[in-house]
Every structure is written in C-alpha cells, then in structure tokens.
Amino acid sequence: MVKPEVREEWLPLREGSPHRYRFEEPDIFFVGDVGDVTGADMACMFDMVEELAARTGRRLFWISDISRLGRVTEEAGKLSVERDVKSLLHATILYGGSFRQRLLANMVAKALLLLKPNRSKRPLYFCATEAEARALVEEMRRKEGGSS
C-alpha cells in the first residue's frame, strides 16, 4: 500500500487567526488549534469541510491537534449546535488533549445528541498522538474495504 503524501506545511485558518490547517489527499483535514476558538474560526472550519468534501467528492477525516487549544467561545459552541457537517465526515479525531479537554469534548458531543436528536451522528475519537490518529484512520479505511 502506498502511503499518502504527508504535507507538513500548515496554512493559516483565516487571516488574524492563530489556528492552522492542512489537507492531505485523499481525505484528511488537519486542524492545529492554537488558543481560543471563536465563532469566526469555527465557521471557517465548517466552510472548509464543506468545500473540501465537495471538491474531493469524499467524506473526510477531521483530525485536530488540541494540545494548544484554549477555550471554545460561546459563539463557537452555538455555531457547532446550529451547523452540522457530520454527514461530510467519516469521523472526528482529536489528539494531544488533556483529560479535561477530552471530558469536555465528550460532554458537548453527548449534549448535542440530546439537543439535536435528528442530527447526523459520526464517531468522535481521542488519541494521544498524531501517529495514533493516523493509525486509526488506516484501520477505519481497512474496515470499509478501502472505499474511502
């Protein structure tokens, strides 16, 4: 099996934002969260998922490095409830987070299921490292028979 090309260059998520992203063909959207996530940051991430999924014709794996994540603002939280891009994703994988960050992310995911029961459901995974996140993506691809 040929390994996908790993692009190391990170691009700014949007002007004025410390967050960064990169896309790896065929279907991995990486986000490196640095500091607080605002509503504008979250909107940009959702826009990028929509654009990349449309451009590639594939569902994506959204992998986020949350090791330098600050807080998620109320505006960003509300936007996460209002906008649903999960139908465009195989899974969301977070890595590098503390126990507290993992706990909060799980609580938010469960709250969304209660607040929006008709919302599409996609798994949320936690890994310690990027290598573990990549291994998880490969395992999911194998289980799907390489159809992603």
Image: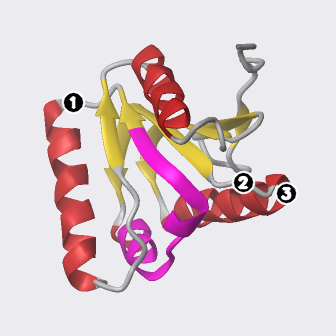
Q: Mark 1 touching mark 2, by CB under 8 A?
A: no
Q: Amino acid at mark 3?
A: Arg
Q: CA distance from mark 1 to mark 3?
A: 34 Å
Instruction: State the residue in front, 129 or 44.
Output: 129
Residue picked out by circle 3: 55
The residue under the point 71% across, 28% down is 10
Q: Position of residue 45 (x, y in %)?
A: 61, 56
Mark 1–mark 3 CB contact (< 8 Å): no
For the N terminus, the quadrant is top right
- Read off the residue under disc 1: 98
Measured from the top left, where is residue 63 in percent x and y?
51, 38
Helix, strand or loop at label 3? It is helix
Amino acid at circle 2: Arg
Can residue 135 be seen in this snapshot?
yes
Question: Does the magenta run of residues contain 92?
Answer: yes
Query: Label 3, label 2: how many angstroms apart (C-alpha)?
Result: 8 Å
Q: Is residue 141 above or below residue 115?
A: above
Secondary structure under the numbered disc 1 in the rendered image: loop
The part of the chain drawn in magenta is 76-93
Q: How many angstroms separate mark 1 from mark 2 (CA)?
A: 31 Å
* Quadrant assignment for the C terminus: top right
